[in-house]
Image (cartoon, helix red, strand yellow):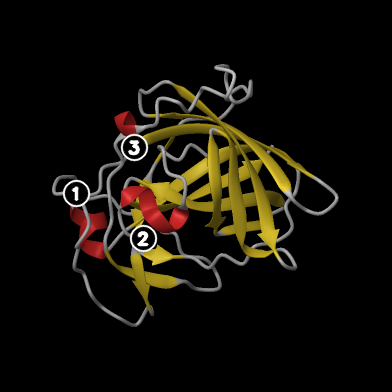
Amino acid sequence: MFLLGCAAIAQGCGGSEASVTPASTNNASNDGGDEDGSPTSGDASSDDGGEAVTDGGSNIDPDAGDPSDDAGTDGGPCNTLANEGQAVTSTCASVRPPTHGGALVGGTYLLESVVALGAPNFCQNQFLPTGFRETLALTVDGAGVGTVQTVARIANTGTHHRTFTLAPGAGGTSPASNTGTCPVSAAAPLPYNSETRLNKQVLELLQPYGKSLAIYRFVKK
């Protein structure tokens, strides 16, 4: 996934991760969001519940990407994957769904949705939708470790390629360990879901969105 120059989920692109509290808590404050935007909301909840996001939120700056995204150690692109994804527009939600993990399944995946996580006030009054197109190719070895190649386009920016490994926790649990091979980045935890829904293989990655986080949902072709 195109991370806008971020190496670690926990660091949230230089800002703090959107904090969460039990869903019964009611707090509409916004201590980390941008100051402009229009009301837009989405639903990131799942059938088995989730946690309410009561603090934070961030809009994405497509022009803040790392210019080295497309450059490998030899000056060439990180991969040659073609972007087959259809354009999707990000939404915003104040529920962070559970990330249970699951066995990785190889194949080509297309981005289906991007759900930014933020406090209710941010989602309703400050969130700015952004367009995305992304294709993800996943190969899995005998130990269940995945090699991921992605090609992404955000808004009207150029095309960005990345390659990284995804090593699930013991027993296929979340978070996985995400290590960038092109561009190179240190291992960092990456919460994820890999499961079948409505007869379709789905891969969800909890990754940076501006200074906060979003659920990037991919569906296997």
**At which x and y percent is residue 150?**
58, 33
Where disc 1 sits, the SS reads loop
Identify the amino acid type marked 1.
Answer: Asp
Q: Nearer the viewer, mark 1 or mark 2?
A: 2
Q: Is residue 165 above or below residue 67?
A: below
Residue ID at (37%, 23%): 157
For residue 15, which quarter of the picture? bottom left
Q: Looking at the image, can residue 197 be seen?
A: no
Which badge, 2 or 3, is on the more N-terminal residue?
A: 2
Residue ID at (54%, 47%): 186
Q: Which residue is under mark 1?
A: 34
Q: Nearer the viewer, mark 2 or mark 3?
A: 2
Where disc 2 sits, the SS reads loop
Rate crowding at label 2 as few (under 14), some (14 to 19) or many (20 or more) other CA atoms within 10 Å. Answer: many
Residue ID at (46%, 54%): 9
Residue 17, label in figure? 2
Which badge, 1 or 2, is on the more N-terminal residue?
A: 2
In the visual, does 31 lie left or right of 74? left
Q: CA distance from mark 2 to mark 3?
A: 20 Å
Residue extending furthest toward the bottom: 24
In the visual, does 120 lie left or right of 108? left
Q: Looking at the image, can residue 174 be seen?
A: yes
Q: Number of labelled discs?
A: 3
Identify the amino acid type marked 2.
Answer: Glu
Q: Is residue 61 above or below residue 97?
A: above
Which badge, 3 or 1, is on the more N-terminal residue?
A: 1
Q: CA distance from mark 3 to mark 1?
A: 14 Å
Q: Which residue is under mark 3?
A: 130
Identify the amino acid type marked 3.
Answer: Thr
